[in-house]
Amino acid sequence: MYSETSQDLLVELDPKGRVLYLDVEGERLLCCTDTDVLGQDWFERFARPADRDASRAHYLAFVASDVDTPQAVDDILMACGVERRVLWHQVLLRDADGGVCGARLSGAFVDAADASDDNLPMLRDALKRLHELRFALDQASILAITDRRGVIIHVNDTFCAISGHDRDDLVGQTHAVVNSGHHPPEFFKQMWATIGSGRVWKGDVCNRARDGRLYWVATTIVPFVDRRGRAYQYLAIRTEITEHKETERRLAAAVDELAAANDRIVREHARMLQAEKLSSVGMLAAGVAHEINNPLAGVKACVTALRAGKVGPDRREMYFDTVVDGLERMQNIVTALLNFARPVTPSQTAVNLPDVVASCMLLASPHAHKRRVQFEQDVPETPPRAMGDRSQLMQAVMNVIINAIHASPPEAEVRVTYVEAGDQIALQVRDQGEGIPAEIIDRVCDPFFSTKPEGKGTGLGLSVTLGIIQAHGGDLKLESEPGQGTVVSLCLPRWQD
Ligand SMILES: Nc1ncnc2c1ncn2[C@@H]1O[C@H](COP(=O)(O)OP(=O)(O)O)[C@@H](O)[C@H]1O
Ligand SMILES: [Mg+2]
């Protein structure tokens, strides 16, 4: 169909057989110009007089048939004053409403030499297959054929429909007509380099329709090469992918938005962690000040007595020990408080959990004393170690211990135990408090959920704790019997040596 010695022509006729369109190849082969034949009766003009009536009758019957598949027809035309044999394939043309508005005939001129009785059936068969292929392509894709310079020779209806241009505006032009300016010149340069050397080019191209609308087409350009390997024609097959591209763009934008939202959440979470921590620090500080005051008073009394020279040499050693003990105790409390309050970047280290719990108990002890709550910790022989960030884990444990103290009645006990299972280790904080009612147990880890009076609870403790534990790849579990107490388990990955 697109052979080097192309003898193809394309003509469109209205239902009465008058010429609607004739392609440039047709003009050449029939020795006429399209303005010369437009509107003219095709059969009157080109059919061999002897066949004229039969050809016309055959055509009218085809138009009336309403059959969409291509039909093969043999014909003798009067072209350039001589009779020439043409093998036609005709398909119906339909208007927007689906009504038949004529037919498109694509024909191949057959040389007398080729048209021997032996060859003809074979030729007819080959042509039939080609036309069926072309028909199928026409139905499925946006097609254009250009010459070697890129000048459009043929476009199908789909091309006209998507670009909004009439066929006459396109044929004789280059694809510059639909260039959107979206792609840099190198893009087309590279395309031309590929197809110019006889290779197939594929790419997504953004074109501009006549009304200015941009549309995307997945494009395959197949060069047809002559015997010397030079491209003499190009067949461009396109499928519209505008929606696909739009979806792709929206998806990319959504991903960006999500990433930005995630950043905001990470920042907000860090802020929340710190806010909750500082609120606990505030609460602890009052107790800690009291806790420091006791040894401080002792230390001061010892130092005053020593300076006044009222201590005999035999008791001096004991006085100094008391001073050092008191100072050490104060130093431990201050260090624990500072460790707790200081924001640090999370690390992945071996965290000795009983150590963390001991620091928490030290900080919370004034609080516990006030409510006469007892702290106990069952430390296994080999202290369990978790993998994670000490400061963050301390914050998590602190939140749970403070909640346990708040829930405890006077004289009750808060006990910390450890359960090791596989590569996990559960730190359990058990209290003998009021318990968590079943109807709220699913909500206590929600941010800002609190049953405490205004100003007493932030409602952030458990949500922050859950966040920390999950960031460690662990889990927080709550078991509670109203009236019996609560067990909060912080399950953490065990440190592997
Ligand atoms: N050990 C516990 N015993 C009983 N209730 C608890 C316990 N721990 C947490 N809760 C409940 O969960 C709620 C949320 O706790 P939390 O997130 O730490 O916020 P807050 O302590 O500021 O109220 C508490 O108000 C309380 O109702
Ligand atoms: Mg709390």
Image: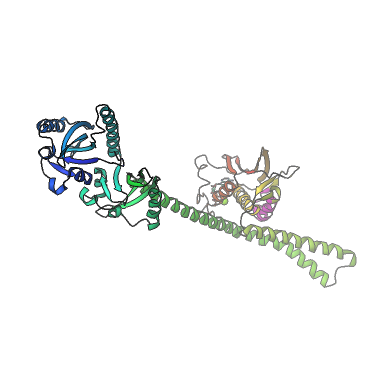
Does the image show residue 455?
no
Q: Residue 236 occupies which quadrant of the picture?
A: top left
Q: Quick check: 380 left or right of 71?
A: right
Where in the figure is residue 169, as x and y percent of width and height?
22, 52
Q: Which region of the structure is painted magenta?
A: 356-374
Does the rendering let one see residue 53? yes
Magenta stretch secondary structure, dominant: helix
Q: Say if the magenta span includes residue 372.
A: yes
Seen from the viewer's position, the closer of residues 163 and 491 is 163
Locate residue 291: give its quadrant.
bottom right
**The C terminus: image quadrant:** top right
The spot of residue 286 in percent (x, y) is 63, 61
The colour scheme used to paint the residues is rainbow
Q: Residue 24 location, x and y as percent?
A: 22, 46
Please state if 37 lies on the left or on the right of 157 as rendered.
Answer: left
Front-lying residue, 205 or 246: 205
